[in-house]
């Protein structure tokens, strides 16, 4: 016989609405009919099976759903995507859980620093959209000593170097599997340690680097955002962040004196080969579309040509490996949490600040993977 449980039905409704989930989605994932969901939210007592199913969908504990009042939760970052307006602010459950995971990882980052008696760096940069993004980018590029990475020929090592610079400023950077909602990244400013999340997998490193600095733009504006990094996005804040990322990675003075750029300019040629765009991009660790947009901004190509290539190259599968390799769990974990986070976890363990089980929890990995993770970290 089913045992029915007394709950605050309004709390269940608030949980669902806070996650921006409609009845259709909850019904699909919980296997509870829409009619039954409405009844439960209207005061009908759920049984244990129903409440457990809802707890799983909402990614909450049963104890949380039994509370009289819902603990105050931080809101989702603002939706900055270029999707249809009817979809704005509506996210897949997987996306919501990734946001929650990012917040949990940032908390773990702080706890690790506390275990090691390390100060939590404070991200102190604040600008307004009234300021010129190109001027801000040039100032910060110099202040953050990007010159030391310019001669780096390995783009993956350059990407790690950029992440290290940003983390030293007081930001937590994670690479997580953003598989839904056409996302490339997001940023969260309402944490003690601001967060940047970059899509892991399915993106070339050049795209990840651009996403990193687009989200840095959001942080210095103190405006969280969930983004698809559309280069034609007309939202003012997205245009500002794109311009900032473009200038900090591809400073105009260096770009306009590049030999290939000069060759096309002197010939009056506005139609670029993809190979030449890629070659110019390699110097700045960006992809061909960023270079083409830079050319458009400096009136060195035409808008129809840019838009045609944007439509051709900015497809969901553009840049993906044709034959993806099997999962490498240890490597994924190092990428996910970042070398700074993983290094702190191992340091805490080696100094007997945490035990092996706690190390496993911080790494989010089974004990058997720990030697491989160490190898990827220091190898």
Image (cartoon, helix red, strand yellow):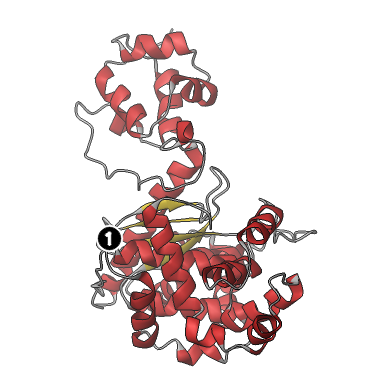
> What residue do we see at 49% from left, 77% from top?
249
Query: What residue is disc 1 on?
Result: 222
Evaluate whether residue 295 shows in this view.
yes
State left or right for residue 201 relative to residue 59.
right
Q: Quadrant of residue 196?
A: bottom left
Q: Which image quarter: residue 65?
A: top left
Quadrant holding the N terminus: top left
* Residue 348 seen by the camera: no
The image position of residue 327, as x and y in percent, is 68, 59
Identify whether 282 is placed above or below 271.
below
Residue at the spot x=39%, y=74% of the render?
Answer: 134
Out of 360 and 310, give the one closest to the viewer: 310
> On screen, 99 above or below 297?
above
Compared across the picture, whether 347 is left or right of 29 comes to left
Q: State how many labels appear.
A: 1
Residue 286: horizontal and vertical position, in percent? 59, 73
Disc 1 secondary structure class: loop
Query: Which quadrant would the C terminus be assigned to in this image?
Result: bottom right
């Amino acid at each position: 016989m089913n045992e029915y449980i007394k709950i605050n039905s309004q709390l269940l409704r608030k949980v669902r609405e806070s996650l921006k989930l409609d009845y259709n989605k909850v019904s699909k994932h919980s296997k509870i009919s829409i009619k039954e969901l409405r009844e439960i939210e209207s005061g009908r007592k759920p049984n244990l099976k129903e409440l457990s199913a809802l707890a799983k969908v909402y990614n909450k504990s049963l104890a949380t759903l039994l509370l009289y009042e819902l603990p105050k939760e931080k809101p989702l970052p603002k939706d900055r995507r270029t999707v249809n307006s009817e979809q704005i602010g509506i996210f897949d459950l997987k996306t919501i859980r990734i946001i929650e995971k990012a917040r949990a990882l940032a908390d773990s980052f702080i706890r690790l620093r506390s275990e090691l008696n390390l100060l939590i760096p404070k991200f102190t940069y604040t600008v307004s959209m009234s300021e010129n993004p190109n001027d801000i980018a040039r100032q910060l590029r110099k202040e953050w000593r990007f010159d030391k990475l310019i001669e780096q020929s390995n783009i993956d090592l350059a990407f790690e170097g950029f992440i290290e610079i940003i983390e030293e400023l007081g930001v937590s950077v994670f690479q997580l599997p953003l598989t839904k909602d056409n996302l490339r990244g997001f940023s969260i400013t309402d944490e003690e340690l601001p967060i940047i999340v970059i899509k892991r997998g399915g993106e070339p490193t050049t795209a990840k680097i651009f996403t990193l600095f687009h989200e840095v733009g959001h942080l210095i504006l103190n405006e969280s955002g969930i983004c698809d990094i559309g280069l034609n996005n007309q939202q003012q804040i997205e245009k500002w962040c794109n311009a900032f990322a473009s200038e900090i990675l591809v400073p105009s003075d260096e770009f306009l004196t590049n030999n290939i750029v000069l060759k096309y300019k002197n010939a009056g040629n506005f139609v670029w080969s993809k190979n030449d765009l890629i070659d110019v991009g390699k110097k700045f660790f960006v992809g061909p579309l960023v270079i083409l947009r830079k050319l458009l901004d400096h009136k060195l190509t035409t808008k129809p040509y840019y838009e045609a290539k944007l439509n051709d190259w900015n497809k969901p599968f553009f840049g993906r490996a044709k034959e993806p390799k099997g999962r490498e769990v240890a490597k994924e974990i190092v990428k996910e949490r970042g070398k700074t986070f993983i290094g702190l976890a191992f340091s805490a363990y080696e100094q007997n600040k945490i035990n092996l089980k706690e190390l496993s929890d911080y790494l989010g990995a089974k004990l058997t993977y720990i030697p491989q993770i160490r190898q990827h970290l220091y190898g």
